[in-house]
Image (cartoon, rainbow, N blue to C red):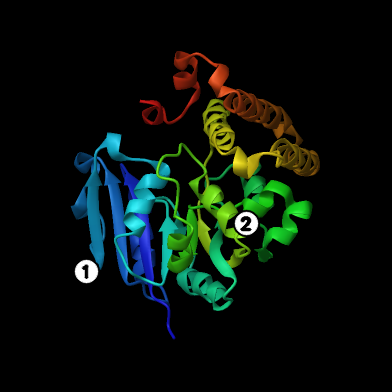
Amino acid sequence: MRQTVDVVIPVYQPDEKYARLLKGLAGQTYPVEHIYVMNTGEAYYRASEYPAPENITVKHLTTAEFDHGGTRDRAARMGSSDLVLFLTQDAVPADRNLVENLVRCFADPQVGAAYARQLPAPDCGAIERYTRQFNYPPESRKKTKADLEELGIKTYFCSNVCAMYRREVYQELGGFPVKTIFNEDMIFAASVIQSGRAVVYAADARVVHSHNYSGLQQFHRNFDMAVSQADHPEIFAGLKSEGEGMRLVKKTAGWLLGHKPWLLPQLIWVSGWKYFGYLLGKRYRKLPKKAVLWCSMNSRYWK
């Protein structure tokens, strides 16, 4: 029986990548039932500049209403499809087979979630390009509870930049947390794994998505990531991220030595900011409120 697919896209001040995303969805070999766009700030949504397929619903939110988990959960419950595909506004399908290749994962009844490979954009810097290769290799993998000893925290890795969920499982496990600063995807993926099901990394399902973050931007991002881990010890306690982060730094440094050694100071600079943000985020409860607000990239969460 053919499984139906709804798409959810949280949006804030969308640009031409969002237009390309909608165009890419329209050209998929596996058509989607409905697209739910959760837009923060109606004044920023210039509808005439974006494709307007008949199967799209745009819901406008205020800034105060947005939440990483809650907004996505609200949209997911609007539809009734078998599968729900979450995308960010800057994740552009790399080809016409994105949806089809994700849907194929769910032929296995054990699979509760599947996420796509993220390819670097043409303007992506060398360090970030290598990071994409590290986090999103060309080989697919099915992850279950049995992989925790080998993979550690990577067992729970899943990215709502482009991830698909079985609706039945999503509803059974309670969906995304409705109040979270970050990591709603990994938090839910952990519940999928702990329930005895599987999460699949589908390397043949591909989106173009990358950022050239500065050291300070990485600091803010890692602070929020660590806050989410501190707030969910039932998932992340005993599964440290530092080891995986150090492995990435060492691998990247080795690659740079052989290819672009002049970028090593940049790697050290950015990695230092990442680690500093992570350390403070894990200890955010000990920080003054003003310090927390400065460290976080999501000040709305704290109000």
* Distance CA(mark 1)–CA(mark 2): 39 Å
> Which of the 4 image quarters holds residue 287?
top right
Looking at marks 1 and 2 on the same chain, the residue that comes earlier in the sequence is marked by: 1
Where is residue 123? Give x, y as percent.
52, 46
On the image, the x and y values in percent for residue 209 come to 50, 51
Question: x%, y% of residue 49?
Answer: 23, 53
Residue at x 73% of width, y 53% of height: 148
Q: Looking at the rendering, in which quadrant would you find the C terminus? A: top left
Judging depth in this view, the residue of 90 and 115 nearest the camera is 115
Horizontal arrangement in the rendering, residue 204 relative to residue 97 (left or right)? right
Would residue 92 be visible to someone looking at this image?
yes
In the picture shown, does residue 158 fall above or below 260? below
Residue 194 image label: 2
Residue at x 45% of width, y 50% of height: 176
Determine whether the residue tagged by mark 1 lies in a helix, strand or loop.
loop
Kind of residue indicated by mark 2:
Gln
The residue pinned by badge 1 equals 54
The answer to whether residue 285 is left or right of residue 76 is right
The kind of secondary structure element at disc 2 is: helix
Q: Looking at the rendering, in which quadrant would you find the N terminus?
A: bottom left
On the image, the x and y values in percent for residue 248 come to 72, 42
Kindly report which numbered mark, 1 or 2, lies closer to the viewer in this rendering: 2
Residue 103 lies, with reference to residue 20, above or below; the image says below
Regarding residue 119, the answer to whether it shows in the image is no
Give the vertical position of 220 relative to 169 (above or below).
above
* Marks 1,2: beta carbons within 8 A: no
- Residue, x 67% and y 62% (percent of image)? 144
What's under tag 1, amino acid-wise? Glu
What residue sits 41% from the left and 40% below the top?
179
- Within 10 Å of disc 2 (Cα), the crowding (few <14, some 14-19, many 20+) is some
